[in-house]
Image (tube, rainbow, N blue to C red):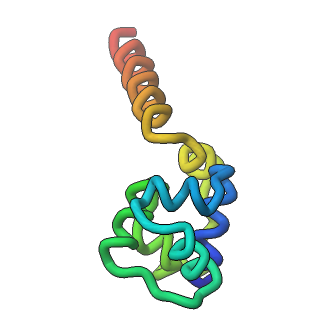
Amino acid sequence: MSFGSRLKELRLEKRLTHIGLAKELGCSQAMISLWENDKSEPTAGAIVRVCRYFGISADELLDIGGAGKPISKIQQLYNMLDSHQRMELIGFIKGMMAGTENK
């Protein structure tokens, strides 16, 4: 899968528009469109921002090493959360784990 196809897939999973994703990544709507249509290659810095935003590795984004390796359902759901929701989830899980350690 190309970078552009993967980016579009990730964007749609989060129900983002080109404008919304551009705002999150600090780039233009036109740049998102160029990437998704494989008309332009992202810089290394842009790849890092995309990976951080979606919570995935560059290997996953660029389909390196795990050709066709499916993403788990938990990872897919986590990827759909915004950064605030992710922090809340992590706090919730830590709380659950702390509770089980005392039993």
Rendered view: 42 above or below 84: below
Question: What residue is drawn where x is 57% and y is 81%?
Answer: 34
Q: How many marks?
A: 0
Vertically, is 7 above or below 95?
A: below
Q: Quadrant of residue 27?
A: bottom left
Q: Position of residue 73 (x, y in %)?
A: 65, 49
For the residue pair 13 and 94, the one nearer the viewer reads as 13
- Quadrant for the C terminus in the image: top left
- Residue 49 or 71: which is nearer the viewer? 49
Residue 96: x %, y % from top left:
44, 19
Q: Is residue 91 left or right of residue 75?
A: left
Residue 61: give x, y in percent of width and height: 49, 71
Most extreme residue toward the bottom is 39
Which of the two residues, 10 or 58, is positioned nearer the viewer here?
Answer: 10
Q: Compared to 100, does 53 lie above or below?
A: below
Residue, far left: 45
Name the residue at 40% across, 60% down.
26
Please give the name of the residue rendered at 44% of the width and 40% of the height, measured from the top-left corner: 83
Residue appearing at x 63%, y 53% in the figure: 16
Q: Quadrant of the N terminus?
A: bottom right
The spot of residue 54 in percent (x, y) is: 48, 55
Horizontal side, residue 19 vs residue 103: left or right: right
Left or right of 85 in this view: 73: right
